[in-house]
Amino acid sequence: MEIEVEVFAEITNILGKSYTSNGRTITIPDVLTKIGIQGPPGLLICINGEGIRIGPSGIYEINSGYKVNFIGYILRLSDQRKDREGIPDYDYFIMDYQY
């Protein structure tokens, strides 16, 4: 069997970084103890080096006090949503957290 890799990218950790939206800056802590993620079923997430997919409910939670120090998302182009120019947009997610 021959396998050809067409695209190879690094997953970026979103923890410990600052993000600005609508003039507001949010800094996500380096370590989280509780997370709740809402996104499209099948969304691929990397948590502490493990690949995890959101199930059919569209919700994924860690609330057992497990320390999360790496979260990265593998976003895909959405077939259902398009931006104002009709170009497909990326899937979106909502992440709640406690630290």
Image: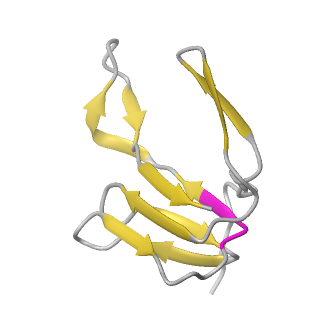
Above or below, 73 against 21 in this view is below
Image mark count:
0
Q: Is residue 57 left or right of residue 86?
A: left
Above or below, 67 against 45 in this view is below
Q: Is residue 62 left or right of residue 84?
A: right
Residue visible at 57% across and 56% down? 73
Q: Quadrant of the N terminus?
A: bottom right
Dominant SS of magenta comes to: loop
Q: Position of residue 3 (x, y in %)?
A: 65, 75
Q: Is residue 78 left or right of residue 62?
A: left
Residue visible at 73% across and 68% down? 69
98 falls in the magenta region: no
Residue visible at 57% across and 76% down? 51
Above or below, 12 against 70 in this view is above
69 falls in the magenta region: yes
Choose between 81 and 2: the one closer to the eye.
81
Choose between 9 and 14: the one closer to the eye.
14
- Give the image's coloring scheme: secondary structure
> In the picture, residue 67 is in which quadrant?
bottom right
Q: Position of residue 5 (x, y in %)?
A: 69, 64
Q: Position of residue 93 (x, y in %)?
A: 41, 48
> In the picture, residue 58 is in which quadrant?
bottom left
Above or below, 46 against 29 in this view is below
Q: Quadrant of the C terminus?
A: bottom right
Choose between 31 and 10: the one closer to the eye.
31
Choose between 46 and 14: the one closer to the eye.
14
What residue span does the magenta drawing correspond to?
68-72
Q: Position of residue 43 (x, y in %)?
A: 41, 61
